[in-house]
Image (cartoon, rainbow, N blue to C red):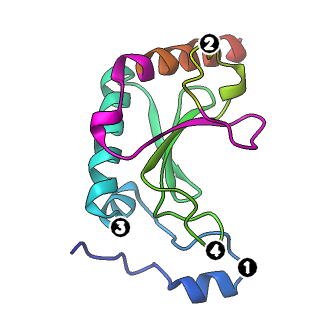
Amino acid sequence: MKNIPANLHSNHDVLSKKSMQNVSFRTVDEFLEFLPKDEFIIVDYLRRVIFEYIPHITEKLRYNVPFYKLHKNLCFIWPASVLWGKKKTYSGVRFGFTSGYLLNDELGYLDKGTRKQVYWKEFTDIKSIEVDILKSFIFAAVLLDEQLAK
């Protein structure tokens, strides 16, 4: 069993303070230590894809999950165990694009739910990650970021 960081609060304590989240991390390492093994495996793999493909990208916690930025936030990795609200609403790990609505998705690969801007792909195991497709969306997000930065 992984160690739970000292700064984590119980669901009851956090939610009673009107927080939308069940956790609070100071570092990416604390975030990673918190994850259940099945989510950690997916998150670790997705992080390696990002850093291999865009080695100069910046990783920073926002909303207690890692976001990745060049000029602006491009994408994020959001495991189901890091809640937004009072209960878990999905399984696995979401790889999201902060400006997904601007990406060309002729394949219908990304989900948007009821969101207007943020689109994502949900993964329940690493075998379901189609790396070439995911990399093409990451590349498109990088190009978009460069265009919007001008």
**Circle nearer the N terminus (2, 3):** 3
Q: Residue at x 71, y 11 (%)?
A: 150
Q: CA distance from mark 2 to mark 4?
A: 34 Å
Q: Is residue 126 one of those drawn in magenta?
A: yes
Q: Is residue 83 one of those drawn in magenta?
A: no
Of circles 1 and 2, the one toward us is 2
Question: Badges 1 and 2: C-beta atoms under 8 Å apart?
Answer: no
Q: Which residue is mark 1?
A: 18
Question: Badges 3 and 1: C-beta atoms under 8 Å apart?
Answer: no
Q: Which residue is mark 2?
A: 106
Q: Which residue is mark 4?
A: 86
Label 2 secondary element:
loop
Q: Nearer the viewer, residue 30 or 43?
A: 43
Q: CA distance from mark 1 to mark 2?
A: 40 Å
Question: Badges 4 and 3: C-beta atoms under 8 Å apart?
Answer: no
Q: Residue at x 52, y 41 (%)?
A: 76
Q: CA distance from mark 1 to mark 4?
A: 10 Å
Question: Badges 1 and 4: C-beta atoms under 8 Å apart?
Answer: no
Taking 42 as reference, is 21 above or below it?
A: below
Mark 4 is on which residue type?
Lys
Of circles 2 and 4, the one toward us is 2
Taking 82 as reference, is 87 above or below it?
A: below
Give the magenta-colored segment's residue range: 111-134
Label 4 secondary element:
loop
